[in-house]
Amino acid sequence: MSRSDRYTDDLGEMDGVGEQVADFLPSPAELARRDSTVKVTLGLSHRSLDFFKREAAKHHVPYQRMIRALVDEYAQRQMSGEGSNGG
């Protein structure tokens, strides 16, 4: 940042513009927490595995993490009743 790019207080000009958004970000302690995991063997189709590997590479994360997050989200929704389709 150059000397001429210094920011100053808005002097209250933005008061009342929009609404304040609640802090929804997890705390650093929550981010550092590691969930316990269980190793399983799971057979996937080549098509599914290729998809997860491709998407994981785009986001620079392990593909196993993406699959685990998907399974966790599915289980959470089923347990809370959101995922029931009445059948």
Image: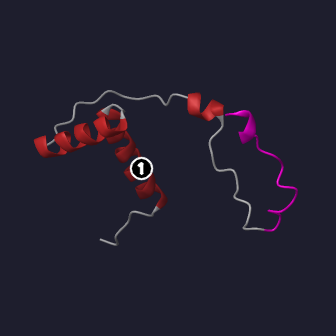
In the rendered view, would you say 14 is above or below 23?
below
60 magenta-colored: no
Residue at 29 percent of width and 71 percent of height:
87
| Image quarter of residue 14 | bottom right
Furthest residue to the front?
Answer: 4
- 12 over 1 or under it: above or below: below
The amino acid type of the residue labelled 1 equals Glu
In the orientation shown, which residue stands out farthest toward the left?
46
* Residue picked out by circle 1: 73
What are the residue bounds of the magenta stretch?
1-16
Where is residue 32? Give x, y as percent. 57, 28
The N terminus, quarter of image:
top right
Q: Where on the picture, by quarter, is residue 72?
A: top left
Q: Nearer the viewer, residue 30 or 24?
A: 24
In the rendered image, residue 26, in percent from the top left (x then y), is placed at 62, 41
Residue 52: x and y, percent?
25, 41
